[in-house]
Amino acid sequence: MGFSWQLLISVTLGYLMLLFLAAYCAERGWIPQNLARHPLVYLLALGVYCSAFAYYGSVGLAYHLGYGYLALYLGLAIALVFSAIILRPIHDLSRSYQLASLADLFAFRYRSRWVGFLTTLGVVLAMLPMLALQIQAITDTITLLDPNTMAWPLALLICLILLAFSILFGARDIAPTEKHRGLMFALAFESLFKLVAFLVIGGVAALEVFGSWPGITRWSQIALEPQFQTSPLQPVQWFSLLLMFVSAPLVLPHLFQLLFRETTNLSRLRMASWAMPIYLLLMALPVMPILWAGQSLGSTASPEYFSLSIGLLLDKPWVTWLAYLGGLSAAAGITVLASISMASMAMNHLVLPFYKPSFSADVYRWLLWVRRLLIGVVIGLSYALYLLLNQVQNLTSLGITAFTGLLQLLPGILGLLFWAGANRQGFVSGLTLGLLVWAASLAVPMLAESLSLGTQLRMGFALEADHWSLTTLVSLGINTLTFVLVSLLTRTSKEEKDAAQTCVITSVDRRHRLPLKARNVTEFIETLSRPLGRIMAEREVKRALKTLGFPLGEYRPYALRRLRDTIEANLSGLMGPSVAQALVARYLPYEQGGRAERDDIYFFEQRLDGYHHQLTGMAAELDRLRRHHRETLYNLPIGVCSLASDGEILLWNRVMADMTGISEAEAIGARLDSLPANWYDLLDSFLKGQSNKLTVEQPNADGRGKRWFSLHRSAQMQRRDEPLEGTVILLEDETEHKLLESELVHSERLASIGRLAAGVAHEIGNPITGIDCLAQDLKYVTDPAEQQVIADQIREQAGRVTKIVRSLVNFAHAGQGDGKADHQPYPLRQVVQDAIDLLSLSRDAQRVIFVNEVADDLTVLCEAQRLSQVFINLLGNARDASPDGEVIRVRAEAEVESAVVEVIDRGTGIAAEVVDHIFDPFFTTKEVGKGTGLGLFLAYTIVEEHYGHMAVDSPAFAAEGIGTRFTIRLPLHRLLPQVTP
Amino acid sequence: MSLSLLLKLFILPFYLLLPFSLDGSGTVQLWYLPFLIWTGLIAVNALAEYLRSRR
C-alpha cells in the first residue's frame, strides 16, 4: 500500500483534532470528573517525557550503544525513586511561592533578575534543538512514507496547529495557580496511545519477525555479530547519559510544569515515584525487539525509524499507521507543553523585568496576550531552527545536544537544594561557562555541520565522534568548579542567605518578625494601587486574604506579614519572582529603624509542623519532644501568654483563651494594644509595674460580677549574643480561691466572736444590771428633774450595750456581701484601737495589757474592719502566748511611703522549726479545738490585699530568748497638699 | 535512617549498573534480564514508598 502525503496530512489533522476534542471535552466537563481527574490521568500525562526522542531516538541509541539506551528511562526512574529528597522540596517551594519554572526557582533563590534571564536564555537555547527534533521527526516519517512530500510547508502547517492547540488549552487564563485540565487529559490520551502503539509494534516485531520466543533469543545472539554491533557500551558513556536524564525532571521545562505546577496534590507525586517507572519500563521494553526486527528484515531506513519500517517491510499498513500516529503523539505532546512553559519563563524573565506594562489598562489581558505571543515565538523559533538544521541531523544528536545544554542547570539546582553558601555570582559564572563550552563543542558545530551537509547523516555527529560524553563531563565539570569557587570567593548577600534558608532542604524557612509600614488591609490596597492600579491591587489583596482565610479588617502584624508573603507569591505566579520581589519590597516595605531581627516564632513553628512527617531518626524524636512540650504548654491549666519585646503576642494558650474570651487565632500575632481595653489595661499595667506578681479583680466579659486573677511574669532567658526576647505572663483564675478565702475569713471572724461571747455577755450584763437597778429606782422617784437624770443614765447604759452589739455586728459582717473591697482612708491608730477594744470584751481581757503606741497622724487606705481582723488575730495570739500581766505593744512609724507597724509581745515565742509555716493555712500549734490554723494565714492575706507585707521575728528579745515581733508594712495614704493661691 | 530510605539506597547500585547486568550473566540469550531486574527494583521501590506512606 502506498502512503500519499495528502492522506498522511489528513490522518495527521484527524488525529490532532481527536486530541483537540479530548482536551475540549475535559475542559468543558463533558468527561466524568472521576475520570478526568483520576490520578492515572496525571500519571499518564507524565508520559510526555517520552517524546519523539524516546519513541524513535531510543532505537537509534540502542543501535549504537546497546542497553545504553536504558539511561533515557532509568535516569528519570532514579530521580523519581529519590523524589522525596530531590523533587518534594521543589514541589513545596513551587507551591508555596508560586514558582512556575526553573528560572523562577533560581531567581527566587539567587535573588537576581539576571539569574532568571540567563536561566531562561539557557533553557530556550537548549530546548530549541529538542523542539526542532519533534518537528523533524514528524516530517521525516512523512517523507519516509511518501518521498514526494514537501517537508517545510507540511512542518509549518503542523506547527500552526500545535500553536493553536497551545494557545487554546494552555493560555486561556491568567492566574497564579492556573491549571490546564483539558491539556492534561489530552496529554494522558497521547501518552497512552503512544505506549500502546509502541508495545504493539514491539509485539508484532517479536511475533511476526522472529516467530517465537526461541527466535528472538537466537537473534539476540546474532545481534552481537560485528555487522550489527558497533561498539560495546563504555561506562563513561553510560554515566554521561545517566547524568543527563537523572536531571530531566528538574531541567526540562515541560516536566517541571507537570510535576510542580499542574498538581498541588502531593500524593500524586508520591504515586508517580513508584508508578511512573512502570510506564518507563513498558516504553523501554519493545526497543530491542524493534531494533532486531529492523536488522533482521534488512531495513535501509535509519535505525531511529525501524518502528515505522517494520510495518512497511512486513507489508502491514496498520502497523505503519500505528507507528506513525504514535510518533505524532509523542512529538505533539512535548511541543505543546514545552512551548507553554517556555513562554511563561520568557514572559517572567525576558519581558517583564525589562518592560513595565501600563497598569491603568486590564493588565491580566495584557499578560495573557503576551504569553500567547511568546508561545508563538517559541514555536516559531523551533520551526526556524528546524529549517536551519536542514533535516540532516539524526534525532539522537539533537536530543543529546539539548540534554547536554540543559544539564548545565544541574549545579545550580544542587546548590539551591543542598548548599546555603551558593550565590548568584557563582551561579551566573558557572552557568555562563558551562553554556559556552556546550555551545562551542556541540551546538555551534551541529549548526555549522547542518548548513554544510546536503544529506541526512545516518548516525553521525555526536555518537560517531563520541565527543558528546567528553563534552558533557567537561562542560559540567567546568560549570560546577566555577560555581563552587566563585561562590566561595565572593560575598553572599543577606537576601540570598534568607532565601537559602527557605530552599536548602536541611534548613527551615525562618522569617523575621519585622513590622510593616502598612498597618492594615486598606493601606495594603492603597500602596499597591500605585504600581498595579486600583482594580488589580484590590483583586490581588482580596485573593491573598481568601487564600489565607483572613478577614478584610485584618490588622494583626503577623497576619499582615503573611498577607505580604502571599501577595508576593501570587504576583510571582503572574509576573515571576524578580518583578514580584522588587514590587513588594518597594511598595510594602518593612520598618527597619535599627530594630533587631527576630524569628517569627509562630510561623517558624508552623513550618516545623509542616515538616514533621518528613523527619526521621533523631530529628523525628526531637520534633516529637518539641510537640510534646508545645502540647503541655498549650494544655496547662493556667493561662500562658508569651510577649515579644515589641508587644506582639507569640503564644496564647487554651486556658488563656478561655479566661479572657479572646481566641488564640485573634490573639496570636496581634499586639497587646489591640486587645480589648480591659485586658490591655491589665496586662500593660502589670508589665509596666515593678512587681512580678499581682492579684487583681477583673469584670466578667458579660458585665455581671467580677473575677480575681493572679498574674505572674518572667523575663525570657537571654540567648547567647542576643538581647532579651520578651516576657512570659501566667494568668491564674483565683476567683474560687478568693471566695473560699472570704468564707474562711468569715468563719474565723465568727470563731473570734464565739471566743469573745463570754466577755461580751459580761460586758453587756453590767449595763443591763445597771439599767435594771435604775428602772427599779425610777418607780420611786417623783421629782421630774431626778427622773430626767435616771433616764439619761439608762440611755447611757443602753448606749454602751448598743455600741458593743454594733461593733460585734460590724465585725461579723465585714468583708461579706458582693465581695467588693471598700478601701477608705482610715487612721491606723483607730484600726488598732478597734481591735484592742474588741479583744477587751474577752473574759481573758484582764490577763494582759494592750498598749497602743501608734501615732495619730498615720493614715492608711484600707477596709478598716478587715484590717482590724489582722490585729485581732495578732494580738489574740500574743495574748495567748504571754504570761498574765504582761504588756503587748503595738507601735507604728512612718518610713518613706510606708507605715511600719510592729506588734511585740514578751510571750514564749515561736519555735524555729515552725516559724516558716506559721502563715500556712490550717497550721496551728494550739491544742485541738482551740485554734483553726487560719488566723495568721488570713492576716497575711489581708495585709497583701492592702498591698502590704508582713514578716515575723522570733525571739523578739534575743538576749532573753522570748517574745515575738510581727512587722507589718502598709502603704501610707498621703493627703494632697493644699494649693495656695 | 528510615527503612524506606535504606531500601532506596540499596536498589540504587542496581539501577546504576543495570545495562551491564547482561555482561555479568555471560549470555545475551537472557536479553530480558535487565527488564526482570528492573521489575524487581520497581517492586522494592513500591514497598519503600508504602512503608514511607505508613509512617
Image: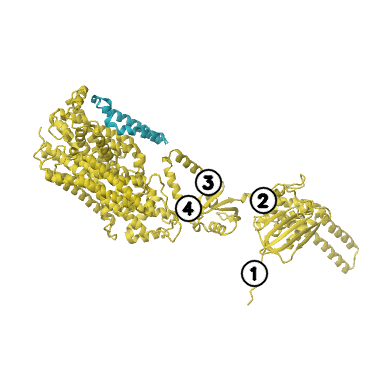
Residue count near mark 2 (Cα–Cα under 10 Å), binned few <14, some 14–19, many ≥20: some
Give the alpha-carbon distance from disc 4 to disc 3, as whole Å: 18 Å
Question: Which chain is indicated by disc 4?
Answer: A
- In this figure, which residue is indicated by the disc labeled 3? A633
Depth check, mark 1 against mark 4: the one in front is 1
- In this figure, which residue is indicated by the disc labeled 1? A976
- In this figure, which residue is indicated by the disc labeled 2? A741
Q: Helix or strand or loop: what does disc 4 sit on? A: helix
Asked if both marks, 1 and 3, belong to the same chain, the answer given is yes
Residue A965 coordinates in the image, percent (x, y): 74, 55
Give the mark nearest the N terminus, 2 or 1.
2
Q: Amino acid under label 2? A: Glu
| Contact, mark 2 vs mark 1 (Cβ under 8 Å) | no
Question: Which chain is indicated by disc 3?
Answer: A
Give the alpha-carbon distance from disc 2 to disc 1, as whole Å: 34 Å
Give the mark nearest the N terminus, 2 or 3.
3
Apparent colour of chain B: cyan
